Amino acid sequence: MEVSNNMLSKIATNNGHGENSPYFDGWKAYDANPFHPQRNPEGVIQMGLAENQLSFDLIKEWIEANPSASICTPQGVSGFKHTAIFQDYHGLPAFRTAVANFMNRVRGNRVKFDPDRIVMSGGATGAHETLAFCLANPGEAFLVPTPYYPAFDRDLRWRTGVNLVPVVCESSNNFKITREALESAYTNAKLDNIKVKGLLVTNPSNPLGTFLDRETLKDVVRFINDKSIHLVCDEIYAGTVTDGDEFVSIAEVIEEEPECNRDLIHLVYSLSKDMGFPGFRVGIVYSYNDNVVSIARKMSSFGLVSTQTQHMLASMLSDNEFVENFISESRVRLAHRHDMFNRGLAQVGIGSLESKAGLFLWMDLRRFLKEPTFEAEMTFWRTIINDIKLNVSPGQSFHCSEPGWFRVCFANMDDETTIIALWRIKQFVRKNRNLEIKTRKQFWLNNLPLRSSSRRLDDILTPHRMSPHYDILTPHRMSPHSPLASPLVRAQH
């Protein structure tokens, strides 16, 4: 017999999980009609998933060369019993040391992380919720600059009762976080009788693909010190920065800010993005506050990483030669795919926010909206899902303050699928020029800070003026030796 909702808890039956948002609706559309090159070539291509699948061959090679790292192989089975029995929820010492080593190397060894401050969690989702439980009471709030990752509404709010207060960032300055925006959000929260307990920033940003410069980070640290509130810095995309020397971690900044109260500084990290291991559910809370470390350890009992996973990753991440090669090669491949997709969009006049990190582009489709409203954004998003058959995520699901921005993920697919996705975009734009409301001059002025191409805008928007050597969206013009010049791609022509 089915149990009615009024017999279940309020947490279990409320809408706090957020599955009714367009971010998750796009996933449902993909699940109902998933693209497959042979079985369903007209299906929806999943471009709403920020997953890094570009370097799995390197992982596979390491696993094949190190069979003893797994307790499920003949070479590693001798360690099965020791790994399978109960382990302390502090985590295997070798695992915490290896993760600290990896975090150091992703940040260019410019900072050192202490293994004793690493707390395990079930992915970054669990890490964020753990910190929310540690730092705030129900009804209290974190400031969060917009646009921000949609699932933060679930991760930080659903079971904790904590609120999120948007810090509105705008395209006029490339969505940068300013002191004025922080002060405004903080003041408005106080006027609404909301107690602000912390500020959450993602660095690099999801969905923007940008990262905070040193001065902005210093200003953020001064702000939270002035207000005596916590700073949670989500750095799960640190290893996706195409030029690692440019990325600045909050761990570096607090070394340069002697007045900083380190008890207020906390990091969230995981191996889901940099290594491409979301299924392993390896999340990390790293706090400079001894009490938070102790409390978070107790809470981690509800979301531990399996010792089998810890055992294997301890071995893999302790291999310094592998780690260095993986980080370097992954960045090269992400940069190549980023540039490939960005140039493909530029050929049909679609700009994106200039970025050097992440697994996505923040795509500017404002000129396709019939009017500058979120209703028009949703109408066009449905067109993208139903007609172009791409699952991209609309900006309003990221709490963007301006309609017309969309996140498109590019690293969760192979080259061939990427080309098909770009080809669909190209075909749609060229068949629907009447959707473009703004003149080219207006588009150009509105997109001065955006990265589109070094080519003249008229050349980008006029297909017949493109050089055949430049048009990466025309498969039949490619070298026959190109992996992109396949029968499947030609079939889409």
Image (spheres, rainbow, N blue to C red):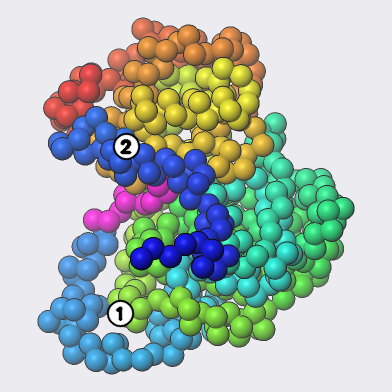
For disc 1, the marked residue is 308
Q: Position of residue 135 (x, y in %)?
A: 68, 72
Label at residue 405: none
For disc 2, the marked residue is 45
Disc 2 residue type (three-letter): Ile
Q: Position of residue 414 (x, y in %)?
A: 27, 42
Disc 1 residue type (three-letter): Gln
Q: Residue furthest front?
A: 1
> In this rendering, would 263 be left or right of 295?
right
Identity of the residue drawn at 64% across and 79% down: 292
Q: Position of residue 162 (x, y in %)?
A: 67, 63
Q: Position of residue 54 (x, y in %)?
A: 31, 49
Mark 2 or 1, closer to the camera: 2
What residue span does the magenta drawing correspond to?
Answer: 46-57
- The one nearer the camera, 464 or 71, is 71
Within 10 Å of disc 1 (Cα), the crowding (few <14, some 14-19, many 20+) is some
